[in-house]
């Protein structure tokens, strides 16, 4: 989903994000701009299925957390040097929510891997999310049929397949049955 802009000598800011042409999306990490490609149908199907499952769970428990699918702005730090649009963000501290998006680390982030986003999701975003204070990070890889769950609070990670039920670490009694997600 992301490719670095060829313009390497410039340091990009949040203003560059806001000045993109209508319909163009990008992420900003430490002065580097990453353009975002259009997501595939399978990608969007997974985002919708997971978002709906999480939303329905939160509603059934009368929970305070909110779930936002992309495009949804996440400003990981106060100086706006990191602007991301995770595929799914779950925010439990409503003080972090503004009209622009989320100021600070969401509690739970899920990224759906696409061929162009692989290095970002598995490396750069993993590091940024962990150091920013995200509690849990899932990497869902439809090509590998794999889910990697990083629980940063307990410094653990687990790998699952698309035939498994995956427990959400930020909730005591919530899991998602990936066998029920048709990625055809």
Image: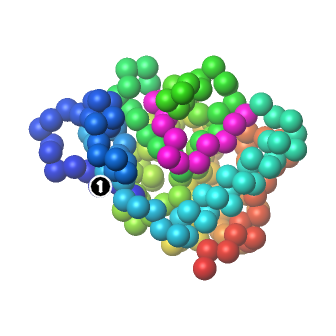
Q: Quadrant of residue 48?
A: bottom right
Q: Does the magenta stretch include residue 26?
A: no
> Which quarter of the rendering shows the C terminus?
bottom right
Q: Is residue 155 visible?
A: no
Tell me what residue is drawn at x 75 percent, y 54 percent.
Answer: 53
Residue 90, image x and y in percent?
A: 65, 39
- The boundaries of the magenta stretch are 65-76
Q: In this view, does 75 lie above or below 112?
A: above
User: Residue 54: x and y, percent?
Assistant: 74, 49
Please give the name of the residue rendered at 49% of the width and 35% of the height, measured from the top-left corner.
74
Query: Residue 111: where, in percent of width, then height?
Result: 53, 52
Q: Is residue 34 left or right of residue 53?
A: left
Mark 1 = which residue? 3
Where is residue 118 drawn, in percent x and y? 41, 59
Q: Which of 181 and 125 is in front in this view?
A: 181
Residue 131 higher or lower than 87, as above or below: above
In the image, 21 versus 48, the foreground residue is: 21
Tell me the quadrant of the picture where the N terminus can be found.
Answer: bottom left
Q: Is residue 93 visible?
A: yes
Of all residues, the one furthest to the left in this rendering is: 9
Q: Residue at x 37, y 59 (%)?
A: 37
Displayed quadrant of residue 128: top left
Residue located farthest toward the front when viewing the structure as drawn = 22
Secondary element at image label 1? strand
Say if the magenta span includes residue 69.
Answer: yes
How many numbered circles are shown?
A: 1
Q: Residue at x 69, y 30 (%)?
A: 92
Q: Is residue 116 above or below residue 78?
A: below
């Amino acid at each position: 989903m992301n490719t670095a802009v060829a313009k390497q000598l410039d340091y990009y800011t949040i203003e560059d994000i806001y000045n993109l042409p209508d319909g163009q999306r990008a992420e900003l990490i430490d002065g580097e701009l990453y353009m975002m490609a259009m997501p595939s149908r399978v990608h969007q199907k997974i985002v919708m299925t997971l978002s709906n499952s999480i939303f329905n769970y939160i509603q059934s428990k009368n929970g305070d957390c909110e779930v936002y699918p992309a495009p949804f702005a996440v400003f990981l730090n106060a100086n706006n040097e990191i602007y991301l649009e995770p595929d799914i963000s779950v925010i439990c501290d409503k003080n972090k929510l503004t009209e622009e998006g989320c100021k600070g680390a969401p509690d739970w982030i899920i990224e759906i891997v696409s061929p162009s986003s692989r290095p970002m999701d598995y490396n750069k975003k993993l590091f940024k999310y962990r150091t920013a204070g995200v509690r849990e990070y899932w990497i869902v890889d439809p090509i590998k049929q794999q889910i990697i769950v990083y629980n940063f609070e307990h410094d653990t990670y687990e790998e699952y397949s698309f035939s498994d039920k995956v427990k959400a670490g930020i909730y005591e009694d919530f899991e998602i049955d990936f066998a029920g997600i048709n990625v055809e």
